[in-house]
Amino acid sequence: MLAVAALLASALPATVQAAGYRSLSAGATHACAIRLDDDAIVCWGSNDLGQASPPAGRYAAVFADGGHTCATRLLDHTAACWGSNVAYYERFLPAGAVASIADGVFFICSLSADGRLLCSDKGPTCDICDDGVPLSQTPPGTFAAVTAGYDHACAIRNGDATLVCWGDDTFGQASPPPGTFASISAGYDVTCGVRVDHALLCWGLPAQDHLRPPPGSFTTVSAGPSHACALRTDGSIACWGRNSFGEANAPPGSFTEVSSGNGYACAIRVDGSLACWGYNGYGEADPPDEVDTTPPTVRCGATPAVLWPRNHKLVPVAVDVAVADAASGPGGFRLLAVASDADDQQGWAIGTADTAGFLRAETSGHAVRRYTLRYRGFDRAGNASDCTATVTVPANRGRA
């Protein structure tokens, strides 16, 4: 039976792939998502107003708009906003826990944890708005979801999952069809929704190509100013509408989230990596590096590799461990175990980056003894590979 000195697995770095992202939100010219490994917000794209510079902390969800971004904190689900005119928009966020935030072009709506709606009227940056649109006059009741467009908003009622819309209805964008809905998203003058039976519908300005969604079975929809994307039940993405910058050319693959911005869109693949396409004038279609899921190359070798003479003494042994990774870079290594047919090793610090210790130059009878030193190397994304260095004590000179 092998005698093995090994570290408990719980004390080692994780060997699963890097965590990736969740809670994706595409604004006008910037986008944000939350990293799964530390719950921090990462933003990219335009940052002229500080909208892509999130505060430190752990977050549950993020909501990107034009010149500002809001998020809910992971610990207590209270809201934080950054970018332009945040003092105005924060007045229309609940003081306590927030379930969801919907940013319109010049206004904001929020849902409290108990489903109550709170919306602003047009904000201080809107000098061309029709002030007669009473967006702050929200409908009564409690709601499960809310979306905000140019100057209208819609929400899904708690209980019966029907829709209610308010604000400007010039093109019918605030006149939803009957039925029960699972997902809702407002563009400028259109609204799209996914019914609970997975049917996809859009209504509003006839000139908008939003009104011609593709057939099929869907789970969620995200409408941008002039195009929209939806997630099919099989995980693929369908986009339609204006395609001046390729924003309606969704990449192949399986995804968990999709969000449409102004002339671009972003999505999260099932492996947690980000994909964006379309207009990239501000870097909004250039997300952080994709998740590295390729294990590093790990090599190790011991010196000396053969212990002789067989004099029963402890011999110092050094191991050279090399970790290489082209994607995210090497992240270090750990000694996992030192094993042989007898417990004749000393000075090896299992679970650390130890590369030196003692092995005894001894065999059992006339058999060859082999010491196996196993290391695990990591890249910076958390992927791992193992290597093994072998030290032999031959039974006779020249026999290994």
Image (cartoon, rainbow, N blue to C red):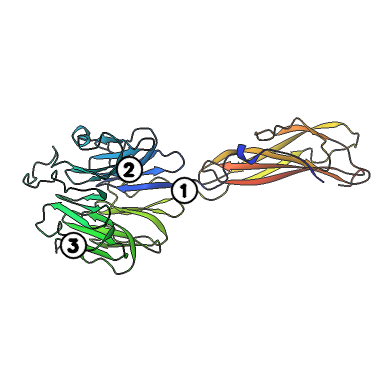
Q: What's the residue type where badge 3 is placed?
A: Trp
Q: Residues within 10 Å of mark 3 (few under 14, many from 20)?
A: many
Residue 315 placement: quadrant: top right
* Of callouts 1 and 3, the N-terminal one: 3
* Of callouts 2 and 3, the N-terminal one: 2
On residue 203, the disc is 3
Residue picked out by circle 1: 291
Q: Is residue 298 left or right of residue 248?
A: right
In space, the residues marked 1 and 2 are separated at their CA atoms by: 20 Å
Secondary structure, mark 1, is: loop
Task: Give coordinates of residue 65: x percent, y percent.
Answer: 24, 44
For image coordinates 75% across by 32% down, the residue present is: 357
Q: Looking at the image, which is closer to me, 18 or 36? A: 36
Q: Is residue 94 in view from this perspective? A: yes
Residue that sits furthest to the top in the current view: 347
Residue picked out by circle 2: 62
Secondary structure, mark 3, is: strand
Q: What's the residue type where badge 2 is placed?
A: Val
Q: Is residue 136 above or below residue 168?
A: above
Q: Residues within 10 Å of mark 2 (few under 14, many from 20)?
A: many
Q: Is residue 53 left or right of residue 325?
A: left
Q: What's the residue type where badge 1 is placed?
A: Val
Q: Looking at the image, which is closer to me, 83 or 391? A: 83
In space, the residues marked 1 and 3 are separated at their CA atoms by: 37 Å
